[in-house]
Image (spheres, helix red, strand yellow):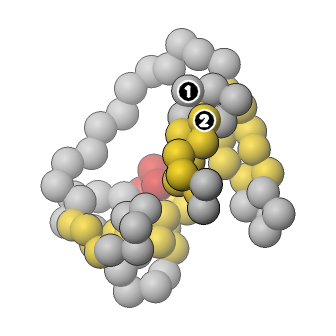
Amino acid sequence: MQVQLADGSYKAISNIIINDSVIDAFGNPQVVLDTFQYDIDEEILELEFENNVVIQCTKEHEFLTQRGWVQAQ
């Protein structure tokens, strides 16, 4: 999954580090204060969108859309 940085470039979410400036769901720049990783014991979905972006997530993941927050399942 790619994350948009405040400078307009993109970076893999796995490569985001503390003090990177990223764009949040509302289009605002935010400084990364902390990062974490955890093991997931859940089924992973792979969603492909109209713009050919592929996202891997769990069924409980929510996406902010024009209709509001929508659950992945």
Badge 2 density bin: few <14, some 14–19, many ≥20, Cα 10 Å: few
Q: Quadrant of the N terminus?
A: bottom right
Closer to the camera in the image, 49 or 38:
49
Q: Secondary structure at mark 2?
A: strand
Q: Amino acid at mark 1?
A: Glu
Tell which residue pokes out farthest to the front in this image.
67
- The quadrant of the image that shows the C terminus is top right
Report the side of 56 relative to 13 (left or right): right
Is 53 above or below relative to 71?
A: below
> Residue 50, image x and y in percent?
82, 63
Residue 2 visible, this angle: yes
Q: Residue at x 29, y 38 (%)?
A: 36
Q: Residue 3 got which mark? A: none
Query: Residue 13's x, y, as percent?
Result: 46, 55
The residue labelled by disc 1 is 60
Residue at figure coordinates x 54%, y 40% from the top left: 62
Q: Tag 2: residue type?
A: Gln
Pointer 1 local density, CA inside 10 Å: few below 14, some 14–19, many at least 20: few
Which secondary structure, mark 1?
A: loop
Q: Is residue 23 left or right of residue 36?
A: right
* Horizontal and vertical percent position of residue 10: 51, 73
- Residue 1 seen in the figure: no
- The residue positioned 23% from the left and 59% from the top of the image is 32
* Horizontal and vertical percent position of residue 6: 35, 80
Q: Earlier in the sequence, mark 2 or mark 1?
A: 1
Question: In the picture provided, is 15 more to the left or to the right than 68?
Answer: left
The span from disc 2 to disc 1 (Cα, nearest Å) is 6 Å
Give the answer, above or below, for where 56 lies relative to 1.
Answer: above
